[in-house]
Image (spheres, rainbow, N blue to C red):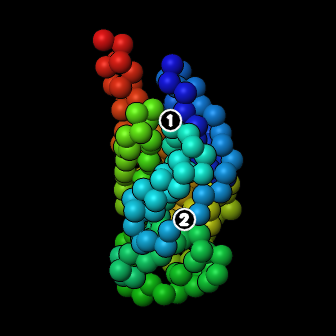
Amino acid sequence: MTQLKIITTNRNKFKELSRALEGIAEVKWVNLQIPESRDLDVVDVCKNKLWLAHKITGERNIVVEDRGFYINELNGFPGSMVNLVLQTIGIERIIKLVEKDKKCYFKYALGYLDENNKTHFFTSVEQGMLAENVRGNNDRGWSPLMNVFISPMFPKKTLAELNDEEWRKYKEVFHKNSHISKFVEFILSDRQASSC
């Protein structure tokens, strides 16, 4: 069974990845802060993060992930710099910046450096709308963005307003075509190719 080292300081990211890889790969959490580049695109940030993680740890079979939040009216801002923006200007001010076009999306990137030193990247995009104001009180330990992001699945609620059953359905649909499911499929196909 493949042994993967998931490098993140975010326990929720580790839990999400380890659940998806259960029975497919052995996973180890490496709680390590990797400096992030200030690119707008999460794929570029992920590539740099993967390279730095390898340089710092000297390890292979490592996994890193990055996420960004893109608002159409703001030309994709804040993108991969979303955490910095949330810490400095806050979610309420982000909402105030958006006047008309409430379309937004999350973009996810997962980077994997295999045992042969080859890099692989997996991405996904989740479209949605920005709420008029902060709503809901259950961000499930993720981010204040849960209080303003409206999924097309539940167009009258932010993610933080979903009850447990709605959240389960949302996550089930999300994972079907996510960067994580693409990575799991890759690991499974790689494992099958190795056993031939």
Seen at 63% across and 34% down, the residue is: 28
In this rendering, the answer to whether 88 lies above or below 155 is below
Residue 157 image offset from top left, x and y in percent? 52, 61
Residue 86 falls in which quadrant of the image? bottom right
Of residues 142 and 47, the one drawn nearer to the viewer in this rendering? 47
Is 105 displayed left or right of 139 in the figure?
A: left
Residue 73 image offset from top left, x and y in percent? 36, 81
The answer to whether the residues at label 2 and label 1 have Cβ atoms under 8 Å apart is: no
Is 31 displayed left or right of 178 in the figure?
A: right
Please tell me how many numbered marks the rendered image carries.
2
Callout 1 crowding tier (Cα within 10 Å): few <14, some 14–19, many ≥20:
some
In this rendering, the answer to whether 62 lies above or below 124 is above
Is 43 displayed left or right of 38 in the figure?
A: left
Q: CA distance from mark 2 to mark 1?
A: 20 Å
Question: Is tag 2's residue or tag 1's residue first in the polypeptide sequence?
Answer: 2
Question: Can you see residue 48?
Answer: yes
Residue 98 image offset from top left, x and y in percent? 44, 84
Residue 191 image offset from top left, x and y in percent? 39, 21
For disc 2, the marked residue is 36
Seen at 42% across and 72% down, the residue is: 40
Three-letter amino acid code at the position of disc 1: Asn
Residue 22 falls in which quadrant of the image? top right
Three-letter amino acid code at the position of disc 2: Glu
SS label for mark 2: loop
Question: Can you see residue 181?
Answer: no
Q: Quadrant of the C terminus?
A: top left
* Residue 61: mark in rendering: 1
Of residues 34 and 14, the one drawn nearer to the viewer in this rendering? 34
